Amino acid sequence: MPPGQFRLNGMTSAAASLAMLERRQAVLANNLANASTHGFKQVDLTPGTLAPSGNPLDLALEGDGFFVVKTPAGERHVRGGSFHLDSERRVVDHAGNPLLTESGELTLPPGALSQLEVSAAGDVKLAGKAVGRLRIESIAANANPQHEGGVRFIPDASRQPIAPEARRVAQGALEESNVNPMDAMTSMLDVLHRFGAAQKTIAALDSVRGIAVTDLGKPV
């Protein structure tokens, strides 16, 4: 293989490695920054631990599945979170996106939230009066939904409603992030070491190219 082509391939490969490692480090840093964000998912959808909160508008899911919220960009999947009422008594997430039921936005009639009940199947009642049933959907096991806004996902084309008897909604609980901080830090250190090795490779190849240009071209 001609020396020029070897140098080109070596430099190109090393540069591509640096770009990939830089992207990987950004993902890991984002995961670590969200290690305490309720409902946050890293590169996998492994469920996090459920922690009781006592807030009747805090919702989580045991096992697989997603709640559905309506955003300006369309419907999005969320694993749950700390919801609240807006000025129209709609149940919304922290960004003001309404939580959806099978018949539209979840709006609560006047009444004390202490009398709010959400069953495991997602049926919502206030003071014993039925308000609606939450939309809860699943995606295919091999799906790779796109993250959006940290805890939101763009629904995968394989989305399907989960039958009420298969749902496990937990009221008054929040799902912890599935990020393991120690694993994330260890991975970041590994990426840092590999980044340094790739930089040394580029420096070595550049040195060889300099020798080829300055020394090999000299008359004997």
Image (cartoon, rainbow, N blue to C red):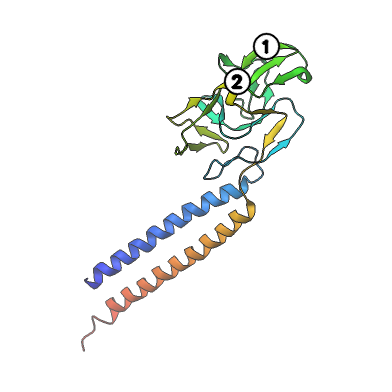
Q: Name the residue under label 1.
A: 130
Q: How crowded is mark 1: few (under 14 residues within 10 Å), some or many (20 or more)?
A: few
Q: Residue at x 27, y 69 (%)?
A: 6
Work out whether 24 lies above or below 91: below
Q: Can residue 146 be seen in this view?
A: yes
* Amino acid type indicated by mark 2: Leu
Q: How far from the left and from the top, in percent, is residue 172? A: 73, 29
Figure check: 47 above or below 6: above
What is the quadrant of the N terminus in the image?
Answer: bottom left
Residue 106: image x %, image y %? 62, 17
The correct choice, above or below, for 73 with respect to 126 in the image is below
> Does the residue at mark 1 contact the one at mark 2 (Cβ under 8 Å)?
no
Q: State the mark number for residue 134.
A: 2
Q: Classify the position of the C terminus by image quarter.
A: bottom left
State the residue at coordinates (77%, 30%): 54
**Residue at the (67%, 44%) spot, across then down:** 36
* Left or right: 144 in relation to 90: left
Which residue corresponds to the image point at 47% horizontal and 37% vertical from the top-left?
Answer: 141
